[in-house]
Amino acid sequence: MIATRGLACQYPGGTRLTFPDLSLGQGETLLLRGRSGSGKSSWLALAAALMAPAAGEIIVAGQCLGAFGPAPADAWRARHIGFLPQKLHLSTALTVAGNLELVYYAAGLPLDRAAITAALQALGVAELAARWPAQLSGGQAQRVALARAVLLQPKVILADEPTASLDDEAARDALALLQASAQRCGATLVIATHDARVRAVYPEAQVLDLDRAREA
């Protein structure tokens, strides 16, 4: 679940964004809509405890994030948040399997190779475990990044513009995989997007319109 009240963030140099209040139940889907620069990435950073609120409160998976210091925030994020960034950030120095192994190190958990295999199988890329990221197609890399995001069965999945630069067929496939992965985890799903196609795939999703976020 995610709840916010009076939420705002502040950037060095004076830019301040305030966000509409929100209440989202566990397992539900939220679409963050808005043009570039409307605050979608900032909202995701707040929800992932990558940024501290300047005002108000945000509660994610039962945790009030404003009370975190940097080290506890990192540990909490690794165990509870699955993040699918627009730039997938797969390490080119590691194989596909090695990229997923990093999840366990970040969370301070023992390595579980069987779980890695199962996550890759669920997304149809188990045969790619020994490949390097440079050997993957764009669609394969996105599946690997999604497998990494859901490996620890997160309570919340955050996806930043997952259909950016995809054609219609690839966008439908990416969104279907994201939805299926969230359902398997029972996770709350948040998708930041300005792509109208996403709304058609998630007609029941709650929408937070950040074009209405106020700059103060």
Image: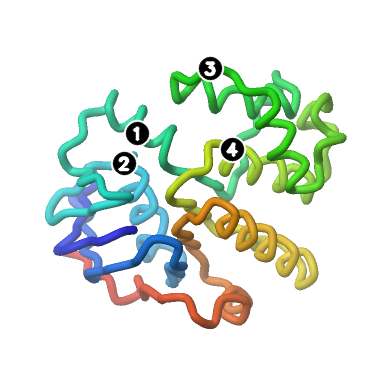
Residue at image point 62% right, 42% down: 88
Counting from the top left corner in percent of width and height, residue 140 is at 79, 45
Circles 3 and 4, Cβ within 8 Å, touching? The answer is no
> Does label 4 or label 1 sit earlier along the sequence?
1
Circles 3 and 2, Cβ within 8 Å, touching? The answer is no
Residue that label 4 marks: 151
Counting from the top left corner in percent of width and height, residue 81 is at 44, 43
Position of 21 with respect to 176 (left or right) is left
Position of 100 with respect to 209 (left or right) is right
How far apart marks 3 and 4 lie (CA) works out to 13 Å
Q: Which mark is residue 110?
A: 3
Q: Nearer the viewer, residue 51 or 36?
A: 51
The quarter in which the N terminus is drawn is bottom left
> Does label 1 or label 3 sit earlier along the sequence?
1
Q: Amino acid at mark 4?
A: Leu
* Label 1 SS: helix
Residue 125 image-quadrant placement: top right
Q: Which mark is residue 76?
A: 1
Counting from the top left corner in percent of width and height, residue 107 is at 45, 25
* Label 4 SS: loop
Question: Mark 1 or mark 3: which is in front?
Answer: 3
Residue that label 2 marks: 49
Q: Nearer the viewer, residue 111 or 131?
A: 111
Residue at image point 30% right, 51% down: 60
The quarter in which the C terminus is drawn is bottom left
